[in-house]
Amino acid sequence: MKGLPTDEPDAPFAFLLQCEEPYTAEMIRRRLLEFNVVCEADDRDGVIALPCHASLAPRHVEYIFGAFRGMVNPCYTFVRKDPAETE
């Protein structure tokens, strides 16, 4: 809490993620907004600012990551070798 002495450093307000092709910062921002994750994007610098504060629980971080991962690696693109096949 503000005003209380502490040895802990202040937590950052946002986690910055550098975006690379083919996913622009604006594309990722729109994807996360579909999951009600409020964030900011700067396409000029290719950066997205994700929420990062003390009230985020691990389940929130997993939710944000899941929304992002579903965009870059959707399940329907995953192909695994049939274990019944022999080499």
Image (tube, helix red, strand yellow):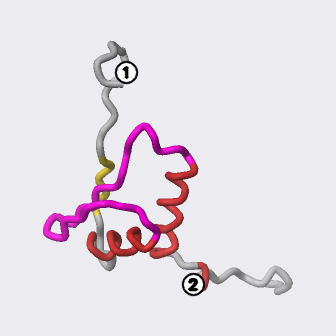
Q: Nearer the viewer, residue 10 or 34?
A: 34
In the rendered view, tell whether residue 84 sits above or below residue 35: below
Give left or right: position of 9 versus 79.
left
Give left or right: position of 52 versus 77.
left
Residue at the disc numbered 1: 8
Residue at the disc numbered 2: 77
Residue 39 in picture, x, y percent from top left? 31, 60
In the rendered view, tell whether residue 29 sits above or below residue 12: below
Residue 22 in picture, x, y percent from top left? 32, 79
Residue 41 is marked as none
Question: Which region of the structure is painted magenta?
Answer: 35-58
Residue 25 in picture, x, y percent from top left? 27, 69
Q: Residue at the location (46% across, 75% down)? A: 71
Q: Quadrant of residue 68?
A: bottom left
The amino acid on which the numbered mark 1 sits, given as a three-letter code, is Glu
Q: Is residue 47 magenta?
A: yes
